[in-house]
Amino acid sequence: MLKINPETKLPYNFIKGSVAQRTQKVRLLNKGVYNKICSCNAPLTKEVLEDAISNNLMDLTQYRKGIIKVKPKTIAELPVAGARAYAGADIDTDLNISCYTINVPFNKDGILTDLSAFMHELTHVHQELLEPKVITRDLAVFNQELNQKSLLNCVSVIQFFYKYLYKTKPLVPNGTDCHFPKTLAGIDWKFRTRHKKSEDKINILQFYRYKLNQEKLAYEEQIRYTKGVNEEIIEKAFNMIDKQLGLSKAQEFVENKLKKELKKARK
Ligand SMILES: [Zn+2]
């Protein structure tokens, strides 16, 4: 069974608060790391990035080093064609989450090549650290699927990310097309055939809903820390990406399903 190592959690005092407050804390943590990176004036090596992340966590939460690691990758090593980076929980052989890793491209001299992609993934890791309840639910979803198949075959979870959500698609000329309606219909079919219990359905839908929310904030932060971007552009650029990836559309789809499922469960 997958579980989080207690040492991988942030102190409760820091993470408590409403969803909006936690979103603000994610932004605050990101900003702290970004400022540290900029003020050190050194090439962005793995060590510089990891130090900035740890020192920032210690400044803000008095937390120990080492819960977030940076793994340099080449573009070819990224799991999805076209992906710029990815992040996630590091699961050891005992199925413990012992740290989080940010996998981003570095050049041959060991220097980060895409700071905004790094900021996107850093957002995800900070989100995970601030939302232990979400991780617990993620784990429930994973564990439920683990009972049926191996981790790599967790169809509804893994496919949702690697096949659908993170699948890149070239910009369409009019910007109105999006691949979500079709792929979500696919997920929907799998979902209905694989998960029969209402409780499981609700868990998975809530999982999707949170992931979509997290993705929106990550893109917003990615744009915020892109060179040459000012506050006025952020919203415009975000709306464009949202349209292209269909995040809000997918969210609407998931919300509606969740509403129906919750209504059924209450009967
Ligand atoms: Zn993301």
Image: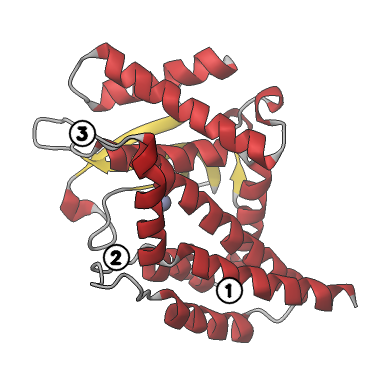
Outermost residue on the right side: it is 267
**Residue drawn 61% across the image and 28% down it:** 10
Q: Is residue 81 above or below residue 256?
A: above
- Report helix, strand or loop for mark 1: helix
Inspect this view and state whether residue 53 appears.
no
Q: Amino acid at mark 3?
A: Leu
For label 2, count other residues whose C-alpha is less than 10 Å away and answer few (under 14), some (14-19) or many (20+): some
> Would you name the residue on which mark 1 appears?
253
Quote the CA–CA distance across marks 1 and 3. 37 Å
Secondary element at tag 2: loop
Above or below residue 150? Residue 76 is: above
Question: At x 55% / y 53%, what residue is drawn?
Answer: 213
- Residue contact at pointers 1 and 3, CB within 8 angstroms: no
Q: CA distance from mark 2 to mark 3?
A: 22 Å
Q: Residue furthest left?
A: 108
Q: Quadrant of the C terminus?
A: bottom right
- The quarter in which the N terminus is drawn is bottom right
- Mark 3 lies on a secondary structure that is loop
Q: How would you rate the neighbour count of disc 3 (Cα within 10 Å): few for under 14, some for 14-19, many for 20 or more?
A: many
- x and y percentages locating residue 94 in the rendered image: 54, 46
Which of the pair 100/97 is nearer the observer?
100
The residue that mark 3 highlights is: 112
Labels 1, 2: front one: 1
Q: Which mark is residue 158?
A: none
Between discs 2 and 3, the one toward the N terminus? 3
Give the residue at mark 2: 168
Marks 1 and 3: which is nearer the front? 1
Q: Which residue type does callout 1 highlight? A: Phe
What residue is at 30 percent from the left and 48 percent from the top?
Answer: 85
For marks 1 and 2, the one nearer the N-term is 2
Residue 71 x %, y %: 30, 37
Residue 222, located in which quarter of the rendered image?
Answer: top left
